[in-house]
Amino acid sequence: MKTETVTFPGATGQTLSGRLERPIGAPRAWAVFAHCFTCGKESAAATRVSRALATHGFAVLRFDFAGIGHSDGAFSDTTFSTNVDDLVAAADFVRSAYGAPSLLIGHSLGGAAVLAAAGRIEDAAAVVTIGAPADVAHVEQNFSEAVETIEAHGAADVKLGGRAFTLRRELLEDIRNQPQMARIAGLRKALLILHAPGDAVVGIDNATVIFRAARHPKSFVSLDKADHFLTRAEDAAYAAEVIAGWSARYVPMLAAPAHPEGHVVAEETGDGPYANLIRSGRHMLLADEPKDVGGQDIGPSPYDLLAASLAACKSMTLRMYANQKNWDVTRIAVSVKHEKVHAEDCATCEASASKIDTFTVSITLEGHLDEAQRARLIEISEKCPVHRTLSSHVDIRTLPEG
């Protein structure tokens, strides 16, 4: 994963600041992330979800709306409508500089913004909201004590998230006059609604209203145990996994770089000293080392992946054989443990090395099988291709670069 700092012109000419989270290699798709009210692109939700999506192959632009963070402009001059305009400008920037932005993601009021902007971004095939309000005016609750002053005097200074902001009557009038329900009903793009049941800032009832107003295809996924701001890293990672899996059905995925058939490519992600992104055709997964050896444990270790290959191959081989025989096997599970043991402790080993790699396999077979069938299946499991490869002499050739 690579993070790039970018700038681009906003809707009214101010320079907006963004961070582009890019995966290793060619992106699967381009996305734009809109942050919550006054939060900025460096918020936990914006940063963590965007970076987690990058590990799934998505390139994501998260940016500061005008008057927020490192973007130009005065916050007091902005409204929800100007935020929507900036979001459209961000999509225009991604399109012109990189590729079509096919996925829009918004957190809290940013979720309302992507719903409002989606109709103006033709490339966007799918929209994702995270803890979004159904009514834009919901944001008033963040400064309810100042509403009377704003209405009477045209402006008021408030503190939001520990920072001072000046809010004007134009903002108040703007959020109260947004045709959000009509926009949701006329979205005509795939919609994923992510919301925490215990959200204390934007209640779960908002997700219900959005879901009922939207047309299909629409989906709702509960972010159980998460808070509104996704302050726990695991909640943001889960949200990203759901978005990546769901969007694959609706978002046109860009072709990955072509590799010769049978080639698997591992490339460093830059996330810690050992993490690698592994590509096999259109499939991707992460590999890493455990924390106790200096890794970050964000993926299986190389030996875990090797054990997984053996387990999966045995399971598939057993299923093929059982289906051919029409045997009643309802479930197959294969557990593999890898370890290095001293040669003298391995009665079946013939090697000159002091330690031997040993894979201990445990097979679970459920169904109506007699003892002869079970014994035959265990015998067949040892004929799986990966088992044969690991049991035979293996020639590994390292070619010169290029």
Image (cartoon, grey):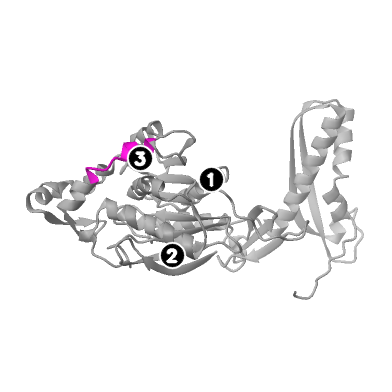
Quadrant the N terminus occupies: bottom right
> Considering only vertical position in the picture, is 379 above or below 123?
above
What is the magenta segment's predominant secondary structure? Answer: helix
Numbered mark located on residue 19 in the image: 2
Q: Using a 10 Å C-alpha cutoff, classify the residue at mark 3 as few (fewer than 14 neighbours), some (14 to 19) or many (20 or more).
A: some
Label 2 and label 1: CA atoms lie apart by 22 Å
**Is residue 352 at all visible to an observer of this figure?**
yes
Query: Where residue 258 sits in the image (x, y, percent)?
Result: 70, 60
Q: Which residues are magenta?
A: 175-185
Q: Amino acid at mark 1?
A: Ser
Per the rendering, the mark at residue 183 is: 3
Q: Is residue 178 above or below residue 342?
A: above
Asked if marks 3 and 2 touch (Cβ < 8 Å), the reply is no
Mark 1 vs mark 3: in front? 3
- Whether residue 47 is in magenta: the answer is no
Name the amino acid, label 3: Arg
Residue 39, position in %: x, y? 32, 57
- Locate residue 170, reporting x and y percent: 18, 52
The circle on residue 247 is 1
Label 3 or label 2, whichever lies nearer to me, is 3
